[in-house]
């Protein structure tokens, strides 16, 4: 059984999460709950959970404040947040698990399943650092993203990504320093994350960083030559949007 502690300052939210867990997850035991940073710290120390569902904003501080009190974090964390837009993007870039308020039972179950699959692979300190950096630095120049391959975790500057290429259920990142990182997520997830940072989905299998664009060869759809000398096919349906983008550079 997975031992779970819920930390949220809203009683209704704690009750909703608890009911959702018991309804949608068969192998969980809610061993404790808390409504603040102080009581949350005591609950974790007392119950030693496998997974903590942790509110971001509480009356006496944040969930990040609570985590900073641990020298070593040996439990999985799923953040509970009401924040939208930019804050959620920061969570995605730092590869931290989160669920949105009001919590949905299916989303909670999916987050628990993901956390269970990754028990023993806790790299939250590095993920948290990337989150802090991204929350402070809004520009592309300072933006970082966490990339997880099968056996490694990489912190990569967004500005150093030349392009991304789909390989089935994986995505290959080609970086400016010559590195190639195969990540265990589909390309669509990165398309949505990186589009605001001057990336363009040229083709079903290709996402490019316009900063590394060199030449466009005309054709039915055409071909895009990138700085790493790769030739990327441009989908016919993307041609108009791409030419419009080029004219705005």
Image (spheres, rainbow, N blue to C red):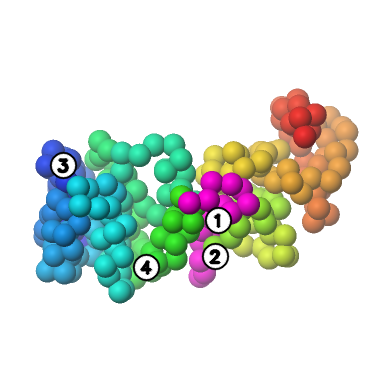
Tell me the tag on residue 144: 1
What x and y, as percent, mark residue 210? 73, 43
Q: Judge by depth and name the residue closer to the eye, 98 or 42.
A: 42
* Earlier residue among tags 3 and 2: 3
Q: Is mark 1 on a helix, strand or loop?
A: strand
Considering the image in quadrants, where does the N terminus appear?
bottom left
Tell me the tag on residue 154: 2
Counting labels gives: 4
Q: Distance between the residues labelled 2 and 4?
A: 14 Å
Where does the magenta region start and end?
136-154
- Name which residue lies at 28% across and 52% down: 62
Q: What element carries label 2?
A: strand
Q: Residues within 10 Å of mark 3 (few under 14, many from 20)?
A: few
* Earlier residue among tags 2 and 4: 4
Q: What element carries label 3?
A: loop
Q: Which of marks 3 and 2 is in front?
A: 3
Q: Is residue 139 magenta?
A: yes
* Earlier residue among tags 3 and 4: 3
Q: Mark 4 points at which residue?
A: 122
Q: Name the residue under label 3.
A: 10
Residue 151 in view in this figure: yes
What x and y, as percent, mark residue 25? 21, 50
Q: How far apart are marks 3 and 2 (CA)?
A: 36 Å
């Amino acid at each position: 059984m997975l031992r779970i502690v819920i930390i949220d300052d809203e009683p209704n939210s704690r009750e909703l999460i608890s009911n959702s867990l018991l309804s949608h997850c068969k192998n969980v035991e809610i061993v404790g709950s808390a409504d603040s940073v102080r009581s949350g710290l005591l609950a974790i120390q007392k119950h030693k959970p496998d997974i903590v569902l942790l509110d971001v904003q509480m009356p006496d501080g944040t969930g990040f404040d609570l985590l900073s009190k641990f020298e070593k974090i040996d439990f999985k964390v799923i953040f509970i947040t009401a924040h939208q837009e930019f804050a959620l993007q920061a969570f995605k870039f730092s590869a931290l698990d989160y669920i949105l308020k009001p919590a949905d039972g299916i989303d909670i179950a999916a987050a628990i399943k993901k956390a269970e699959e990754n028990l023993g692979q806790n790299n939250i300190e590095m993920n948290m650092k990337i989150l802090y950096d991204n929350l402070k630095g809004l520009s592309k120049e300072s933006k970082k993203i966490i990339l997880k391959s099968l056996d490694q975790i990489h912190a990569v500057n967004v500005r150093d990504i030349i392009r991304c290429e789909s390989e089935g259920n994986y995505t290959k990142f080609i970086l400016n320093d010559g590195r190639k990182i195969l990540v265990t997520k589909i390309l669509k997830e990165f398309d949505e994350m990186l589009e605001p940072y001057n990336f363009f989905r040229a083709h079903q299998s290709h996402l490019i960083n316009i900063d590394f664009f060199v030449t466009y060869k005309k054709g039915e759809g055409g071909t895009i030559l990138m700085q790493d000398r790769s030739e990327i096919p441009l989908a016919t349906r993307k041609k108009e949007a791409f030419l419009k983008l080029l004219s705005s550079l």
